Structures are given as structure tokens and as C-alpha cells.
Image (spheres, grey):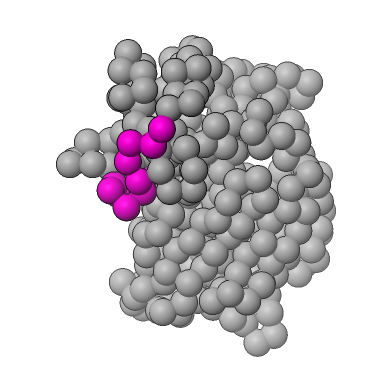
Amino acid sequence: MRLISYELNGAEGVGVMVDDSGFVPVASAAPDLPATMLGLLEQDGAIDALKGAADGKPAEMTLADVKLLPVVPNPKAIWCVGVNYKEHQDETGRGAQEEPMIFLRIAEAQIAHGDPMVRPSFSDTLDWEGELAVIIGRRGRAIPREKAFDHIAGYSIYNDGSVREWQRHTSQFGPGKNFQDTGGFGPWMVTPDEFGDPYAHELTTRINGEQVQHTGIAAMDHKIDKLINYLSTAVTLNPGDVIATGTPGGVGSRRNPPWYMKPGDVCTVEITGIGVLENPVIDG
């Protein structure tokens, strides 16, 4: 099952995709269930109930009828993992990390599939970072690695757009990772039964159709179960929390010469089994 978050007439909704453009609103398929993504994730059994309620129903609306929102518009936490692929470790010179390198994003910095990614007017160092996003569906603290996948509601695509000179102001590089309208998240959440083994899939980032990143998800250093165990040891993971699992090699800042996104560019991140997250770049 593929679920979108959208806005229509000022109200947030959730839709179950029937094909790549048509969907059934949750409010129609299952009016007794919460009508927001966070509400669905927070209610025990709601996702499973929705599968049964929406199964076989024809599309009632299309993506053109609504404004897409980030898959989880208002997560309590967006946990991001740094240098989690060997090629990216090598190109940054950081090497392998004994424990995951973690930083946080804020919801205010997120954008949906199709929204413009905004390069701040005073910077020319807006960079791409295509990533697999893991969405938590079940609350847990100190989650054992062998039970980690029981806590996953689904998967999506993240583009951790980064303003590099702000990232490098200090070793605490949060500001460069949180510029307004730079964190692409979409187009939808794919439930684990449809996505299958995450390590069987591949990630590709393209700028104007030219491939700039490519990896098998299996090349991830700290795997998904380790990340869930590690983060939940520090703090309770809640439904709707997002883990952006890291980007592979090929970022623009590490090229010679550096290659950054500019207004008019289109950045796409594709993950097999999910689809494509696409964002045009504009000046802000």
C-alpha cells in the first residue's frame, strides 16, 4: 500500500494510491479512521484496517486535484544519519564510524514531492543527498535489533538538501541541514509488505537527468536495525518519527570542481520499489 499526505481546501488528508496518479481518500474509504498521516500512525491497527477498507476501491481523486505534503508533515523527530555509505565516507575523508553519526532536521525545513527546493539568495552551495527514509509506526524504547522491523510503518525517499558553507560553520552542522524548504520528503510512504527487503533495492539521484549518485541500499554501513536500536536506546521512538538513513557517494561538494544546484535545475531521487521524489530548484 502507498499512502500520500495532501492538503485540500486548507485541510490535511491521507490518500491510498490506486495507481501512480489516482487515489482513494481515507476519509472516504474508512471515515472512522484518523484523516491525517500522524493520526493513522499513532492509532494501533489503523494502517492494517485501512488496507482492508481501501482494497479494491476505485480512485476518486488524482494528484492533480490536491497539493501534496511531505509524507509525514509534522513528525516529532527527523533523525538523519551522516556518512553511512563507504563511498561517502571516502569522499569526505571521515572514514567508517564506529557508531552512527546522528543529527536532527526540523519539520519546518521539509518540502513535498514537486515543491521547489529553495536555494538561499546569499548562497551558491546548495547540495543534494538522496536517502532512504524509514518511518516509525510503533512506539518503542531500547528496541532490540531483532525486533526493529516490527516498529516500521513504511519507507519513503528523502533528499537532505544541504547548504554547505553553513554546514561547515562549526562542527555542529545543524543550520546548514535545516534551511527553509530544502528537505524533500516523498512522494508517498510504501508499507513494508509492498516494499519487501529494503536491501534488495537501489537508490539513484539525478540532476537534470544526469546520474550523480547510485548505490544499492545493501551498501549501507550501519543497517536499519542498528539505527533503530541505537536511537531508541537514547530516546523513545514515536509513530511518525523519520530516520533518513544516509546518502551515498557523489555529492556535489566533493567533486572537482564542486557542483552545486542552481535555479532551473531539477533534482530527482529514485528508489526502486518506491518511485521518484522530484523537486525543481529556485532562488529564495
Give, as a single range, the part of the protein colored magenta: 58-69
Q: Position of residue 143 (x, y in %)?
A: 68, 20
Left/right placement of residue 214 relative to residue 104 reads right
Question: Is 128 left, or right, of 97 in this rendering?
Answer: left
Up/down of 21 relative to 3, above or below? below
Is 64 included in the stretch rendered in magenta? yes
Magenta stretch: includes residue 186: no
Furthest residue in direction left, as rendered: 9
* Residue sitting at x 48%, y 26%: 56
Q: Residue at x 69, y 25 (%)?
A: 149
Q: Residue at x 49, y 43 (%)?
A: 19
Nearest the camera: 199 or 273?
A: 273
Q: Residue at x 48, y 72 (%)?
A: 266
Occupied quadrant, residue 33: top left
Q: Is residue 98 above or below residue 166?
A: above
Quadrant position of the N terminus in the picture: top right
From the top left corner, tell me how far across and down residue 76 is, in percent: 43, 32
